Image (spheres, rainbow, N blue to C red):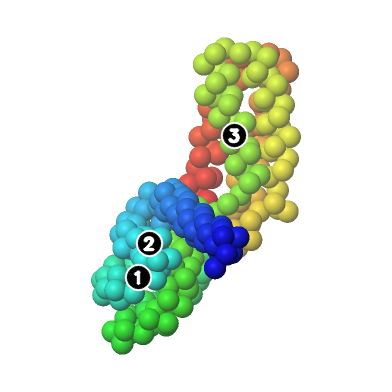
Amino acid sequence: MSYRNRFQKKASLQQITSLVALTAVTLLLVFGTSSAEDDANCPSTAASNDGQTAFQKFHEVIAPVWHGSWPKQDYTAMFAAGPKFNAAFKPIDNMPVVFKTEVRARTFETNRIEFRRLVKEYSGACANMDSAKVYALLPELHDAFEQTASALLPVKYPEFEGFMVTLELIKDKHIPDNNIEGMIGSSQTLVSKMNELNEKTIPADLTEKKDAILAQFDEMRKIVDQIKVVSDKKDLVDLKVQIRLLDTVARKFQKRFL
């Protein structure tokens, strides 16, 4: 082999080695980052914080398999996970849940049925040591787990969340700092954001509670209107009273519907 050919072969091997190393680092970063962020972003964490700890227990079992064994195709660990999934699913299968709407209740039960089916199918594939089926089922099982946990999360209502941001700014920042201009300016913003809380912006999951929600909005709107009046008068004493009253009513709404 000529010196030129040996040099070209050596260069090609170096390029392949570099590419393999780069791919390995990339996979490590992708799955490592996902694993690190998973606890914070997984719906099971929020569900657990709301008292549904069974989902957090299942998460502790599935996370190492999903982020470690599956991308590595470690079938020994994936087969061993079958009985663990069965055991961790039992509390979820038996848990009674009280929902604020029928829509959420139906969504949860539909997702739990699919979750149950996949746990059973995955367990069977593990018992048969069917590596292809186990590998194909795990992403579906993981998705079913997250979808079921998601039905337990608070209803997303962006317009209400924006309203609360302004209310909390006044209550927790402007009032303690005695920031008169901040209180007046944010009170005007509060009026604008109150107008966004109406029939058109009610989330689909809350449609069945529409009449009760609109009645609650009417109560909040009366307080907001009074806040605008006392804000225009720069009556800071009454403004503080009205802000505290609105905060109480808004949090009751949040607890009841979201």
Amino acid at circle 2: Gly
**Is residue 34 among what the camera can see?**
no
Residue 4 percent coordinates (x, y): 60, 60
Label number found at residue 68: 2
Q: For this view, does 106 lie left or right of residue 164?
A: left
Label number found at residue 56: none
Task: Check whether the beta carbons of the residues at disc 1 and disc 2 lie within 8 A of each other.
Answer: yes
Picture residue at 60% right of the left edge, 42% below the top: 161
SS assignment at label 2:
helix
Above or below, 37 relative to 228: below
Q: What residue is shown with label 1?
A: 74
Alpha-carbon neighbours of circle 2 within 10 Å: few (<14), some, or many (≥20)?
Answer: some
Picture residue at 58% right of the left edge, 52% below the top: 156
Distance in Å between CA atoms under marks 1 and 2: 8 Å
Residue 160 percent coordinates (x, y): 62, 43
Please tell me which of labels 1 and 2 falls first in the chain: 2
SS assignment at label 1:
loop
Q: What residue is shown with label 3?
A: 165
Alpha-carbon neighbours of circle 3 within 10 Å: few (<14), some, or many (≥20)?
Answer: few
Residue 187 percent coordinates (x, y): 67, 25
Picture residue at 63% right of the left edge, 56% below the top: 203
Above or below, 56 relative to 78: above
Please tell me which of labels 3 and 1 falls first in the chain: 1
Distance in Å between CA atoms under marks 3 and 1: 46 Å
SS assignment at label 3:
helix
Task: Check whether the beta carbons of the residues at disc 3 and disc 2 lie within 8 A of each other.
Answer: no
